[in-house]
Amino acid sequence: MQTLDKSSLQTSDFSFLDNSLTIAGKTFQSRLMTGTGKYRNIAEMQQSIIASSCEIVTVAVRRVQSNAPGHEGLAEAIDWSKIWMLPNTAGCQTAEDAIRVARLGREMAKILGQEDNNFVKLEVIPDPKYLLPDPIGTLAAAEKLVKEGFVVLPYINADPILAKRLEEVGCATVMPLASPIGSGQGLKNAANIQIIIDNAQVPVVVDAGIGAPSEAAAAMEMGADALLINTAIAQAQNPPAMARAMAMAAAAGRLAYLAGRIPVKAYASASSPLSGTING
């Protein structure tokens, strides 16, 4: 019988399971995106970004430009030669406002050294209580921004029809919410997210509502291409530790999805064969 040793179980054995994420022709090795809001201080944010091993960090353009509380000096606190900036239109309530802020975000990325960065996380949120995105305004803004050469990553409710329409107008991803922003409720929209994943021809990034690494892993096991997690990390008792946990969960969930889980059965199935057993 051939025996296995640790040296035969190296990561390279799984090299065929490509973990890279490609958005609009740009490739990233991490499938976890993080944010910059809600941290107690800049140091915790910096430590968490490093611990997460993420390569994409979203930044609220309005809050950075206005030096909103918690965002003072934020643009200079991150090494943008190593992290890809994802400007977002947080705080915009109309399509027109989001388009204007997206343009400002592109200029901000250029000023910080990312001359070829046309990415924007599109958020159009007129609802101050539940913070649910406006589907009509999002689609209108996306159409305009795509025509202007933006790589649009739209934040949406888990609506399969809207996701397909956004894909058809040229969005680079779709970003359905798992549950309301910052709620930590987890995958409340799993059924619709699964429909979006099954029908999308662009990466699906599960955004908002993830509260624990188990939920992050579950979203990746469904076949999501990536996650965007902010509050669950920033508001944890130990943000860097939670950032690392989320990174590990995203990687484990992706590997599990590629490995292919067993089907769910309504009955037991013995793990050892019954033939050849010794009868007393």
Image (spheres, rainbow, N blue to C red):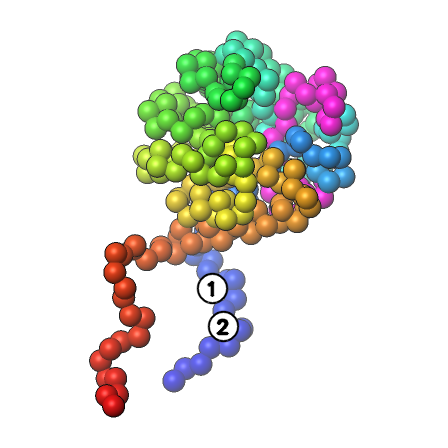
Q: Find residue 195 and name its label.
A: none
Q: Magenta span covers which residues?
A: 46-71
Q: Is the residue 117 above or below the residue 143 in the image?
A: below
Number of residue marks? 2
> Can you give x and y, in whole percent of width and height, for residue 114 in the image?
64, 29
Say which residue label 1 marks: 13
Where's the N terminus, which quadrant? bottom left
In front of the other: 133 or 84: 133
Q: Is residue 1 magenta?
A: no
Could you give the CA–CA distance between mark 2 and mark 1, rounded to whole angstroms? 8 Å
CB contact under 8 Å: marks 2 and 1: yes
Q: Find residue 8 and name its label.
A: 2
Type of amino acid at the residue the image marks with label 2: Ser
Q: Earlier in the sequence, mark 2 or mark 1?
A: 2
Label 2 CA crowd tier, 10 Å (few <14, some 14–19, many 20+): few
Residue extending farthest bottom: 280
Residue shown at the point (60%, 35%) measured from the top left: 230
